[in-house]
Image (cartoon, grey):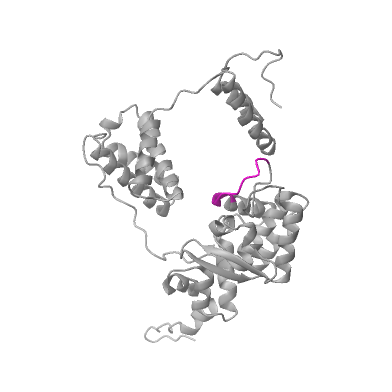
Amino acid sequence: MPRLWSDASPPVLQEAELLAVFGRERQPRSRFFVFASTRRVYTRYLRAQGRLVAVPQPPYEDLIRRYVQYLTEVRGLSVSTRIHHTITLRSLLAHVQRSQRSLQRLSRDDLERFILERSREVSRHSLQHEVAHLRAFLRYAYDLGLVSERLDALDTPRTYRDELPPRALPWPSVLQLLRSIDCTSRSGWRDLCILHLIAYYGLRPSEVVRLRMDSIDWEQALLHVYQSKTRSPLLLPLDARTLRLLQDYLQHGRANSASSMLFLRARCPYIPLERTAVGDIFRKRMREARLPDCAKHVYRLRHTFAMRLLSRGVGMKAIGDVLGHHSFYGTSAYLRLDVAMLRDVALPVPCTEGGSHE
């Protein structure tokens, strides 16, 4: 536990100093999580006692707050979309500060340098989204007179729909992943249950974290899922193995909490998981199972589920309904992964004059 002083009467502290002291506990990582809750409670206590000097508000923080309010009230964007816009905006404003320029003097050359920096850190698809975020903010800034000229006419990276096929894991690797999870802890039971539902039922991370305690119909052995993309309910039949796993999770893995959500944090505070936590769980368990690092996205499990259905002769319409696709086109991308079916429709290779091809 971090020790700040030895006498009974605590001095007045800078908030940055308090964060620095607790930050020394980041190694090992698990111990830092134990102290994170303590730090939050202690910070509130020191503030109430008037013994903590707040960290000065970063530059542009008020601008970010007003822009998020605009995205919420005027454009009606979802929480997750607003978060992505905010991350891009913070990166841009940090670049402006490093360049020792004001937002009013921002130029096209500054933006090009910023986009070039980002291109070295993110993929073309991610950069395309970030450029869209920049365009939206620059239009907003120009309308309010925060920038001196129209800067939103930015070139965006070229991407092509379905230029990369979905990537699935070999089923033996999925089994190895699930069998490697140590269920002697709460997090083990929870992680196994989450990854099992994605691998065997093709749920999205957002659908997993939205599951509630009453989403499980124990008598009918059904799982009620709200599909985020189609905004429609889905009933999935649960086999005996999945029901037992859910029961084991509720008995051994889920914290005793009044929350109505099914999956919670394994450590206090016992609050519902966020969508991004599912990806963190997948990557952590992949490392522990010593599986290839190439599978870094939890959607690999969902793609694997779709491929298993396709290989067993399930129709594309049924696969699309289970996966919650808007159209047949989204589901048809999985056809490109079925090598056997591709061989059946492949055209013969033309022969050159005087040559032969067998």
Quadrant the N terminus occupies: top right
Q: Is residue 212 left or right of residue 343?
A: right
The picture places residue 299, in percent across and down from the top left corner, at 55, 60
* Magenta span includes 150: no
Q: Is residue 191 at least partly visible in the picture?
A: yes
Residue 305 lies, with reference to residue 147, above or below; the image says: below
The answer to which of 213 and 270 lies nearer the viewer is 213
Residue 268 lies, with reference to residue 247, above or below; the image says: above
Residue furthest to the right: 184
Q: Is residue 290 at least partly visible in the picture?
A: no
Q: What is the chief secondary structure element of the magenta stretch?
A: loop
Residue 272 lies, with reference to residue 12, above or below; the image says: below
Q: How many marks can you see?
A: 0
Quadrant in the rendering for residue 36: top right
The residue that appears at 61% across and 57% down in the rendered structure is 212
Residue furthest to the left: 149
The answer to which of 14 and 303 lies nearer the viewer is 14
Residue 17 lies, with reference to residue 278, above or below; the image says: above
The residue that appears at 53% across and 63% down in the rendered structure is 226
The picture places residue 72, in percent across and down from the top left corner, at 38, 46
* Magenta span includes 274: yes
Range drawn in magenta: 268-277
The residue that appears at 55% across and 52% down in the rendered structure is 275
Q: Is residue 297 left or right of residue 36?
A: left
Quadrant in the rendering for residue 61: top left
The picture places residue 285, in percent across and down from the top left corner, at 66, 53
Q: Is residue 37 left or right of residue 126?
A: right
